[in-house]
Amino acid sequence: MAKMDLIDVANSKSIDQFIEDYLPSSEWRSWIHPATKAEYQITLQTAKAMSQPDFDACFHLIEITSADDYKKSQDGWKPRSKRKEMKLLDLKYLLVKLDNQVQGFVSFMPTYEDDYPVIYCYEIHLSSALQGSGLGRVLMQHLDVVGEKIPGTAKVMLTCFLSNKRGVDFYKKLGYAKDEFSPPPRILRNGTMIEGQYVILSKDIKR
């Protein structure tokens, strides 16, 4: 009998079944801002099922928080390509809303990277009112829970621009470190070492 692929199993579940199996506690469904005491609602949605207004709001958050980093990179800022990537089949979104308006999100996918079963964090973006509030840490912890619940998952992984120093520092505080498969620096003929434009970070799943 062929060995069951638990990543495929996770991705084949309905969103309700995914929540029941991998986010069993209901505590993740809301979050209270420590300063304003406003209560934010959190939902889990697939890229396919997300409404167009919510999708546009997520894209706008990426644009205002990260477009400059993309523009500085070799590939540049390509809105059409980014929108296409945001609709990848197995991508899931934890949407953070206040008064039914998207204020932040984290997108992720159970998948394989270099033959390792992982939870890959594609994006995490918060409105200015939520930055530095502690919500980012909470959202990333939800990914830890999903990884812990999917048997065999090795780690949580993500890609971050090195120019995004605040982001790199944030992930390192959460226990992320440079992954073994992160691109090495380029060494010029004169011996000068040139760092890449991004780094792949990862954190082992604890069980």
Image (cartoon, rainbow, N blue to C red):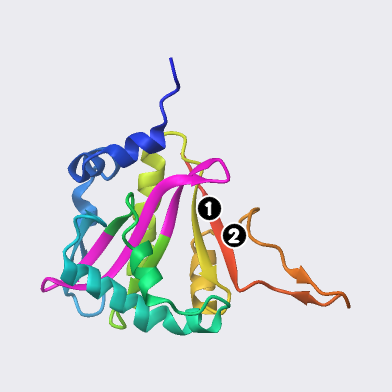
Which quadrant is the N terminus positioned in? top left
Query: Principal SS element in the magenta part?
Result: strand
Residue 119 is a magenta residue: yes
Q: Position of residue 91 (x, y in %)?
A: 33, 54
Range of magenta residues: 94-121
Q: Tell whether label 2 touches label 1 (CB within 8 Å).
A: yes
Going 38% across and 51% down the picture, which residue do you hit? 109
Alpha-carbon distance for marks 1 and 2? 7 Å
Residue 60 is situated, as x and y percent measured from the top left of the image, at: 29, 78
Query: Could you say which is closer to the camera, residue 144 or residue 191?
Result: 191
Q: Secondary structure at mark 2?
A: strand
Q: Position of residue 56 (x, y in %)?
A: 23, 73
Q: Nearer the viewer, residue 37 or 59?
A: 59
Which residue is most to the right?
A: 190
* Residue occupied by mark 1: 203
- Quadrant of res 38: bottom left
Residue 200 in view, yes or no: yes
The kind of residue on which mark 1 rests is Lys
Mark with earlier residue (1, 2): 2
